[in-house]
Amino acid sequence: MLDRVIAGFLSNFSLVMLILAVVLAFALSRPWRGAAGSSLSEELFRWVSLLAVGLVGLYTGVSHIFFSQNAAAEIGWQTSPFQFEVGMADLTIGVLGVLAFRAGLGFRAAATIAATIFFGGDAIGHVRQMVIAHNFAPGNAGPWFWTDILVPIVLIACLVTLWRQQRRLAVSGR
């Protein structure tokens, strides 16, 4: 029983982290609670960056590098030496996500660009596998595919909102 719960958690890790990030952002956003402080966009960017990019990137990096057979099977692939390279890219994106949690807008923009390109490429790869190879394995067509689409959208929307807020503050002289 417990092994199925753990397996389900890990199979849906990207979606669990995205949902947890959204819940934390709403819970910790000061304006949401009626107090002065960080905006919902700020909290949402921070938690999505830390959890849905950072922890997911670290998890998938470790999975592809050290548990390549399991990672490949979950995606519906054969084990490949290229998984090491994918794992290193995942680790890179994960570290950027963790660092963006407290970084300034410029670093956040760079981290968002990197994550968007990487996740967007993943999403395209998943679609190609669905269309060409009829690969509808959970790791290819399930939550991982959807978070590859949703996470960059959330990051970009938050980043644009934060940039506009910063610009308004600069114009108003605060």
Image (cartoon, rainbow, N blue to C red):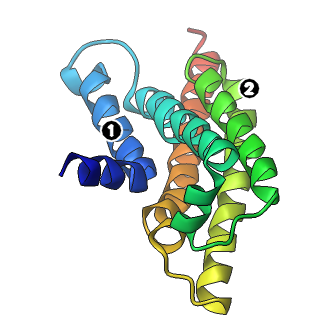
Instruction: Judge left or right: residue 113 versus residue 57.
Output: right
Compared with 10, 24 (above or below) is: above
Where disc 1 sits, the SS reads helix
Compared with 114, 73 (above or below) is: below
Disc 2 or 1, which lies upstream in sequence? 1
Q: Residue at x 40, y 18 (%)?
A: 38
The answer to which of 82 and 103 lies nearer the viewer is 82
In this rendering, which labeled residue sits more in front, label 2 or label 1?
1
Q: Residue at x 31, y 46 (%)?
A: 6
Tag 2: Cα neighbours inside 10 Å, few (<14), some, or many (≥20)? few
Q: Say which quarter of the image contains residue 172.
A: top right
Q: Say which quarter of the image contains residue 75.
A: bottom right
- Across and down, in percent, residue 107 comes to 73, 25
The kind of residue on which mark 1 rests is: Leu
Q: Residue at x 67, y 51 (%)?
A: 116
Provide the residue designation for mark 1: 20
Provide the residue designation for mark 2: 106
The kind of residue on which mark 2 rests is: Gly
Q: CA distance from mark 2 to mark 1?
A: 25 Å
Compared with 140, 59 (above or below) is: above
The answer to which of 138 and 26 lies nearer the viewer is 138
The answer to which of 79 and 108 lies nearer the viewer is 79
Q: Residue at x 62, y 25 (%)?
A: 100
How many discs appear? 2
